[in-house]
Image (spheres, grey):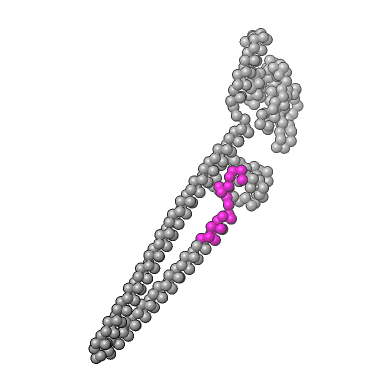
Amino acid sequence: MLRIRLQRRGRKKRPIHHIVVADNRKPRDGRIIEDLGRFDNVTPKNQLTLNRERAIHWLKKGAQPSDTVRSIFKNQGIMYEMHLLRWGKSEEEIEEALTEWREKREEKEEDVPTRKERQQALLDAEEKEFQKQLKKKAEEAAREKAKQEALAAEEEEDEADEEVEAEEDKAEEAETEETQEAAEQEESEEVETQEDTADEDKEDDTEEAAAETEEEDKTDDDAEEEVEASDDEEEDEDNDSDEDSEAKTSSDMLAKEAIEHIENTPLDELEGFVTDDEDRVTVQRALDDKKENS
């Protein structure tokens, strides 16, 4: 039985298919009866060169097209023309019907985007979504920063209030001490016999003031140690943030930047660059192409 099928030709990774008529018992790349044309499905527009008259000639003789060739013939209107011939239509009727069919197909093709247009639309959609995510992250970071600054301002105000209260306490203590000293002087002038008792009281007051001074010095030292500890923690956090900023993944970049990074970086250095939560098709496709070409 005669078959109209595709015969692979061309080179590696760049095939060109011949549309041939051959015996069904022959191998795919074996001897053929007639070459009807070429079909290049690598290009976006699927370029086709076909001898229409010879294709119809072999169809009339009973040659059976393969599924792929049947789809090509149907797209070119050959199967429709064969249908009209079997119904006994005249050449004028066939030509008129084919003209109408071609006009409808052209209108339909105008509404269908090309592969390149679909790819660009997909890339634009991914870029828009990525920009939206970046904007959301920036807003969250700004809110967190404002919250931290507000907390820091409140802590500074509390510390300032504590310092004012401490100064007021010191002033009150100083006034109390002056009042006591004045009272003691008056008592010493009035009653000389109570001088020894007043001196002892004064020594006791001096010891209490010294103890309070030591406690205040200790409190100041503790405050300085806390400030130094907080400074060390801030330096550690800055170092951690610097280390995190050095290790970038595809989710931290725009799709175009991630694709350029994949194309310009050796495959052994791309391990871990595309994360598991990466949902952009173009980035995944770029990594797959890199693996195939390596």
Left or right for 231, reference 60: left
- Looking at the image, residue 223 lies above or below residue 178: above
- What residue is at 72 percent from the left and 31 percent from the top? 16
Give the dominant element type of the magenta stretch: helix, strand or loop. helix
Whether residue 240 is in magenta: the answer is yes
- What residue is at 26 percent from the left and 87 percent from the top? 189
Q: Report x, y in % for residue 149.
A: 45, 57
- Looking at the image, residue 98 lies above or below residue 203: above
Q: Report x, y in % for residue 136.
A: 49, 46
**Towards the viewer: 150 or 164:** 164
What residue occupies the far bottom of the structure in this picture?
193
Span of residues in magenta: 237-257
Res. 170 in view: yes
Rendering quarter of residue 198? bottom left
Whether residue 261 is in magenta: the answer is no
**Towards the viewer: 145 or 15:** 145
Left or right for 190, reference 171: left
Left or right for 94, reference 194: right
- Looking at the image, residue 47 lies above or below residue 162: above
Q: Give the position of the N terminus as an image quadrant.
A: top right
Left or right for 38, reference 87: right
Q: How many marks?
A: 0
Q: Report x, y in % for residue 137.
A: 50, 48
- What residue is at 50 percent from the left and 62 percent from the top? 234
Rendering quarter of residue 174? bottom left
**Towards the viewer: 266 or 171:** 171
Res. 70 in view: no
- What residue is at 62 percent from the left and 50 percent from the top? 270
Q: Report x, y in % for residue 90.
A: 66, 8
**Towards the viewer: 239 or 217:** 217
